[in-house]
Amino acid sequence: MLIKNGLVFTKDFKFEKKDILIKDGIIEKVDDFIKADNIDENHIVDALGLKVIPGLTDIHFHGCVGYDFCDGTDEAISAMAKYQLSNGVTNICPATMTLPLDRLKKICSVAANHKSGEGEAVLCGINLEGPFVSPHKCGAQNPEYVHKPDVEFLQELINDSKGLTKLVTIAPEVNGAIDCIKALKDKISFSVGHTIANYNEAKLAFDMGANHVTHLYNAMTGLTHREPGVVGAAAENERVMAEMICDGIHIHPAAIKAAFKMFGDDRIILISDSTMACGMPEGEYELGGLPVYLKDKAVRLKDGTLAGSATNVYECMVNIIKMGIPECSAIKAATYNPAKSIGILSECGTIEDGKRAGIVLIDENYDIKKVIR
């Protein structure tokens, strides 16, 4: 396949007029001009007037179109992967919830054996959002199944997933958390979240090897002038990357802009945190065994607590561009940064020679015109 005449978002994070040659699913060449000799005209895509960006990567979502990753079935993974691909997301790292240990083991095992089919986003990781969270900051996590950080059990999940586990959310103030980070930091990334940790507790976790923050601002201590909390500790550590749910509901636009100023566009990762209600009509759904309700584009528990979202990460990217975040920064936060954070940047995240061909063609209004995987 040859993509011609498009404005390509290059590995230098800027748009340039380029052609892209794809062979056997791999980007073979990106150049100013590539001849169309010996290429069937049906395999030539004219991207004149369009922008060409890398396929997005969502490293934190729970479900969509009536399915949940925690269903623990191949059918659920495939249905979600098809929806995500149709919305420009070519790589997925779905998240678990706080559930019984045997269920988590099954979910990891099913994911490890999933083969990404045609028309699906590539399953490139697992995000364990539970069960090592604070019982005081459960959010929509089920407090009945909260578990203290446990090195041996976490290693079991890594084994069950055949190494597919990329991220683990952890509350650093809980006994055993720091030991867990120190023991397994070279195998997986630890993400501080669902926590009441103060600045010093969060700083210790980052100093010991945690390098990620689960949905910044949400379900954690905030930034104040005398107690900088998790946000302050994360912002000052240059190794730490921070997720944000930019659905227009979880975080005020001013706080999103402040985060980009504090962290820079190298360290912000857009996530959807979507639930099975994403892509569905208003009504009652389920998240982690708890009933949730979709109304006015927000997903909440019965008591009104926000419980994930009903959006996808492409919509989040467009949202922040409309809020005033520079376009190139927004695209980087939805493509390059998430791929980097879970260690798959050698395969995807940019449009350059040798990488998998995950590509999205969009128009000036950010409407998706074509997705190539």
Image (tube, rainbow, N blue to C red):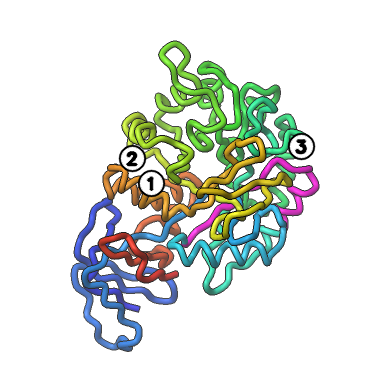
Q: Nearer the viewer, mark 1 or mark 3?
A: 3
Q: Position of residue 332 (x, y in %)?
A: 35, 49
Q: Residues within 10 Å of mark 2 (few under 14, many from 20)?
A: many
Q: Position of residue 193 (x, y in %)?
A: 57, 32
- In the rendered image, is residue 187 in sight? no
Distance between mark 2 and mark 1 Cα atoms: 7 Å
**Eyeballing the image, is 283 above or below 307?**
below
* Left or right relative to 300: residue 131: right
Label of residue 159 in the image: none
Distance between mark 1 and mark 3 Cα atoms: 32 Å
The outermost residue toward the top is: 226
State if disc 3 and disc 2 touch (CB < 8 Å).
no
Residue located 46% across and 40% down the image: 244
Residue located 65% across and 35% down the image: 303
- In the rendered image, is residue 324 in sight? yes
- Amino acid found under the numbered disc labelled 3: Tyr
Label of residue 145 in the image: 3
Q: Which residue is mark 2?
A: 265
Q: Which residue is mark 1?
A: 333
Q: Residues within 10 Å of mark 1 (few under 14, many from 20)?
A: many
* Residue closest to the eye, 79 or 304: 304
Magenta region: which residues?
A: 90-109
Q: Position of residue 11 (x, y in %)?
A: 30, 54
In terms of sequence position, does the residue under pointer 2 or pointer 1 come before the other?
2
Q: Position of residue 316 (x, y in %)?
A: 42, 49
- Amino acid found under the numbered disc labelled 1: Ala
Residue located 43% across and 32% down the image: 239
Q: SS of the residue at dot 3? A: helix
In terms of sequence position, does the residue under pointer 1 or pointer 3 come before the other?
3
- Amino acid found under the numbered disc labelled 2: Asp
State if disc 1 and disc 2 touch (CB < 8 Å).
yes
